[in-house]
Amino acid sequence: MTIKAQVHTDHILQNYDVIAAQAAPHTIIAPVVKANAYGLGAVEIVKILETKKPLLYYVATLDEAIALRPHTKADLIVFGGMQVGQEAEFLAHDLIPALKSAEDMRLWRDAAAAEERPLPCHIHLDTGMNRTGIQACEDSDATALIRGLDVRCIFSHFVSSEETDNPLNQAQIDHFVSRAAQYELAFGCPLIKSMANSSGIFNFAQSHFDLIRPGGGLWGIEMETGQGAGLKPALQLSAKVLQVSEIKSGQSVGYNELYRANRTHHVATLALGYADGLHWPASNQAEIYWQGKPCKIAGSVSMDLTTVLLPDDLAESERPCPGDYMELIGPNQRIETLAKSCGARAYEMQISFGNAPRVQRTYLFK
């Protein structure tokens, strides 16, 4: 094992409780476990969250939902909606599509007619993201198709909910409420409504409605500095030292001579590279920790290896040895700090590390 990822399950469960405390008691909490639970292992994370008995989970793709189905009886909602020919798989695995267009609604209503029963779905309204979701110009067609469906929830997604002073957030909320009312009128009764992702949960209480969708917040990732007080990081990451070398003044380290020493240094080479999720822009920028002391990356992050400068004040006996591990994410450095020095976002970096083949996850239980 050259790269160790430790997942603190007690932190995840505590984060769930912190998030639940932000909302009204009746609010449904629907964890988002797409992208392999943001790199933490979706099957394992769902098993952990099952102790909280969530009613539903959101994933991104049909394949993700099929992989999770044996591990939970909760509803599994596919954000990506459905394509022609997928109807049978949704039915066979008891999965629920988030219908993202009038065409999706037509396909699912036809499937419902063939099954001779209303089929469950969520309806996704686009209120400004302009990626997926039913556009306002489709509302007339979509509301005409709603009869014959078992609509479990109608939702939208914030563009910039971590930006508390951005007026687009309230504009999106107002737009969603107005459009959702049209669907409720066509359906004939109130619908469960959802808008808030992790940052929306903490920043816009008026967006909680009936169901909230925490993702990164469950793993203790800060949306912005200070947002989500009480959340604890779930992930710690460390990499094995392969070699410790001395370099002289004038010698370079790594590809393309990206770092050149101006005095004698000791350099530790780690079994970690961009194939494992450490982005190349970390070269000569990011820090990795040895016994609480920062060690700056020296030279280029390569595919499999990264070199760091050891502090000059370390005695020989205090330096790491081959087989020791150095900390990338942990008590001395949050993932947000490492990500910023790599020109990345914390979500992006956690997914990169967590889903890299050579990173081995272990789950810590208390």
Image (spheres, helix red, strand yellow):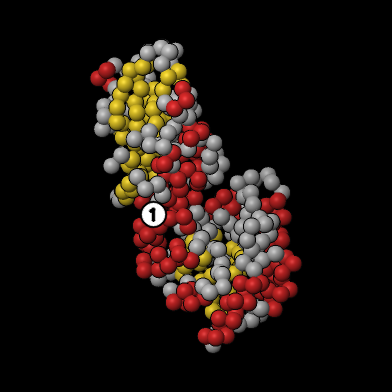
Q: Is residue 141 left or right of residue 94?
A: right
**As shown in the figure, which amino acid type bears the numbered disc 1?**
Gly
Q: Residue 303, image x and y in percent?
A: 41, 37
Front residue (pair 63, 46): 63
Question: Which secondary structure lies at badge 1?
Answer: loop
Give neighbour class at mark 1: few <14, some 14-19, many 20+ (Cα, 10 Å): many
Q: Is residue 23 left or right of residue 327?
A: right
Front residue (pair 217, 147): 147
Q: Residue 332, image x and y in percent?
A: 40, 32
Q: Is residue 187 visible?
A: no
Q: Residue at x 70, y 64 (%)?
A: 135
Front residue (pair 5, 170): 5
- The image quarter containing residue 343 is top right
Q: Is residue 5 left or right of residue 150?
A: left
Q: Residue at x 36, y 51 (%)?
A: 9
Q: Is residue 64 visible?
A: yes
Q: Residue at x 50, y 54 (%)?
A: 215
How many numbered marks, from 0 up? 1
Extreme residue in the bottom direction? 116
Q: Residue 247, image x and y in percent?
A: 36, 17
The residue carrying mark 1 is: 41
Relative height, residue 87 to residue 300 (above, below): below
Image quarter where the N terminus lies is top left
Relative height, residue 346 to residue 65 (above, below): above
- The image quarter containing residue 37 is bottom left
- The image quarter containing residue 170 is bottom right
Front residue (pair 32, 26): 32
Extreme residue in the front direction? 256
Q: Residue at x 33, y 40 (%)?
A: 3
